Image (cartoon, rainbow, N blue to C red):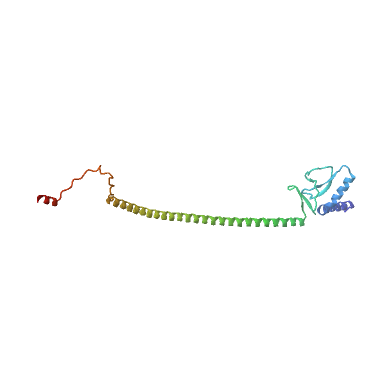
């Protein structure tokens, strides 16, 4: 193996190590390159299927343009840009495991919430059934009370009718007895003057007739 081949292999391995483990070192190199070449203005980060995060010097770029990302990843050991969510994500094995744990916990919480909702819905359904039953019982009770009240009212009306008939009969009987028995005549007042009264002739009796015959 020639010296040039060895250098190429070492260079490739070094680049792969930088890409997988220390992208920040590559970023430093890109910044140093910008200082020596005024044609380049900034560092952008290539992130696609081939490279997770590969910093390079760039002329000038205001917004992301696939596969170039303007925003620098922070707080991430092995960043990879998600072009769907437009965010940097952890792409290391440990990071993937952590992300998987987070997603698993979120899934468990979602399942628990679904179970709670189902239980609440079941309780609500039971309460609705109980309320419906209570309403039916109340309707039946009201209907029964109405029929009973109607029967009581009919009995009272019949009793009142009988009592009214007796009162009418007694009133009619009392009116008949008053009509049969006339009131006693009242004495008339005497005239104060004698001139208005005609003289009454004396009536002869049997004793007076005997005296005249003797």
**Left or right of 8 in this view: 125:** left
**Left or right of 183 in this view: 78:** right
Residue 160 on image: x %, y %: 38, 54
Q: Is residue 94 visible?
A: yes
How many numbered circles are shown? Answer: 0
Residue in view at x 41 percent, y 55 percent: 152
Residue 4 on image: x %, y %: 89, 51
Q: Residue furthest left?
A: 214
Residue 191: image quadrant is top left
Residue in view at x 36 percent, y 54 percent: 163
Residue 150: image quadrant is bottom left
Q: Nearer the viewer, residue 155 or 166?
A: 166
Residue 5 on image: x %, y %: 87, 52
Q: Residue furthest front?
A: 214
Q: Is residue 15 visible?
A: no
Q: Nearer the viewer, residue 120 or 68?
A: 120
């Amino acid at each position: 193996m020639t010296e040039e081949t060895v250098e190429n292999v070492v260079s490739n391995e070094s680049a792969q190590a930088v890409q997988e483990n220390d992208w920040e070192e590559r970023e430093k190199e890109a910044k140093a390159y910008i200082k020596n070449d005024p044609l380049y203005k900034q560092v952008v980060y290539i992130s696609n299927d081939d490279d997770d995060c590969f910093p390079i010097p760039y002329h000038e770029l205001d917004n992301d343009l696939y596969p170039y990302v303007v925003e620098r990843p922070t707080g991430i050991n092995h960043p990879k840009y998600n072009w769907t969510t437009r965010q940097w994500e952890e792409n290391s094995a440990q990071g993937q495991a952590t992300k998987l744990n987070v997603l698993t916990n979120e899934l468990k919480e979602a399942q628990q919430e679904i179970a709670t909702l189902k239980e609440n819905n079941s309780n609500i359904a039971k309460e609705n059934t109980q309320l419906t039953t209570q309403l039916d019982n109340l309707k039946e009770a009201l209907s029964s009370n109405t029929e009973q009240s109607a029967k009581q009212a009919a009995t009272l009306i019949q009793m009142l009718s009988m009592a009214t008939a007796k009162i009418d009969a007694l009133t009619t009987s009392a009116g008949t007895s008053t009509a049969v028995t006339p009131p006693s005549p009242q004495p008339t007042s005497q005239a104060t003057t004698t001139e208005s009264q005609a003289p009454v002739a004396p009536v002869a009796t049997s004793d007076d007739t005997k005296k005249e015959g003797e």
